[in-house]
């Protein structure tokens, strides 16, 4: 859902308990001094990214569809497959090939020990339609999704694939998962409090944010 940035700023100021709009941090006569509103604005995207990257999947919105082409290492619809991810990809919500028995919501990374197992010559250690595995890897072309594996042959298609994009401020608004709006506001206030050296208040806000993400 898209929320107005000025509304997030207002609510973050309330969380910070600073009601005088654009209160100066040091001196109102210093043109280089950031105002509270400017600090809050600078933290909104970062706060949304932190919250949405770490929240449980059931608090996420439906996201955007994955629509890239899929290639297979050997025969079409058999074994390992891969897909180039869009530039705004931040987090996988769900991925399921048509011959899989279940979807994957938690991908692994290249650094995960399970990633090495996917190259094992023993098929029982690799992902399969009954227990599929999805990995997000980084290549010169960008992020790539790899998956193991398919057995269905040429009839196999992507049945369900959705992702959460990187949150960006556009046209004075930002898209945030509806169930995570309050957590993003509190996280914005937390990051702003750190910048303001209000460390005690920041820790209280951080605790509140974590509670909202449970």
Image: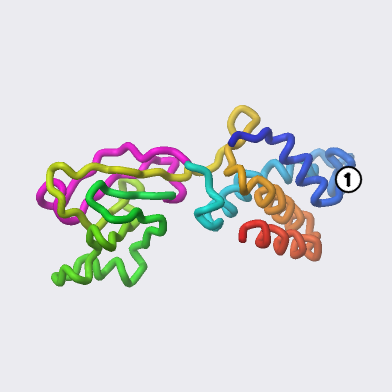
Q: Residue at x 86, y 38 (%)?
A: 21
Relative image position of residue 92 (x, y in whole percent):
42, 50
Q: Name the residue under label 1.
A: 27
State the SS at label 1.
Answer: loop
Q: Which residue lies furthest to the left in this view?
A: 75
Which residues lie in the magenta part?
63-92
Residue 90 in view in this figure: yes
Q: How crowded is mark 1: few (under 14 residues within 10 Å), some or many (20 or more)?
A: few
* Viewer-proximal residue among 20 and 72: 72
The answer to whether residue 165 is left or right of residue 32 is left
The answer to whether residue 158 is left or right of residue 64 is left
Relative image position of residue 198 (x, y in whole percent):
80, 60
Relative image position of residue 94 (x, y in whole percent):
39, 50
Q: Residue furthest top?
A: 171
Determine the image quadrant of residue 120.
bottom left
- Is the C terminus in the top left, top right, bottom left or bottom right quadrant? bottom right
The answer to whether residue 134 is left or right of residue 21 is left
Q: Which residue is drawn at 62% across and 48% down?
A: 180
Residue 182, compared with residue 198, is above or below; it is above
Count of labels in the image? 1
Residue 33 in view in this figure: no
Relative image position of residue 114 (x, y in whole percent):
31, 69
């Amino acid at each position: 859902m898209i929320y107005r940035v000025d509304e997030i700023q207002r609510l973050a100021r309330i969380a910070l308990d600073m009601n005088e709009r654009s209160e100066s941090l040091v001196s109102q006569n210093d043109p280089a001094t950031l105002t509270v509103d400017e600090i809050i604005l600078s933290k909104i995207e970062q706060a949304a990214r932190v919250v949405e990257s770490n929240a449980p999947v059931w608090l996420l919105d439906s996201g955007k569809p994955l629509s890239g082409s899929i290639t297979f290492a050997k025969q079409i619809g058999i074994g390992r497959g891969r897909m180039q991810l869009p530039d705004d990809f931040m987090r996988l919500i769900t991925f399921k090939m048509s011959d899989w028995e279940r979807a994957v919501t938690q991908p692994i990374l290249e650094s995960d020990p399970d990633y090495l197992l996917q190259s094992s010559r023993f098929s029982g250690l690799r992902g399969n339609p009954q227990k599929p595995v999805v990995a997000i890897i980084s290549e010169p072309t960008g992020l790539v999704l790899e998956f193991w594996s398919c057995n269905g042959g040429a009839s196999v298609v992507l049945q369900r694939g959705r992702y959460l994009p990187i949150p960006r401020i556009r046209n004075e608004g930002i898209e945030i998962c509806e169930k995570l709006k309050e957590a993003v506001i509190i996280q914005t206030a937390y990051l702003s409090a750190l910048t303001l050296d209000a460390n005690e208040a920041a820790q209280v806000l951080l605790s509140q944010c974590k509670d909202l993400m449970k």
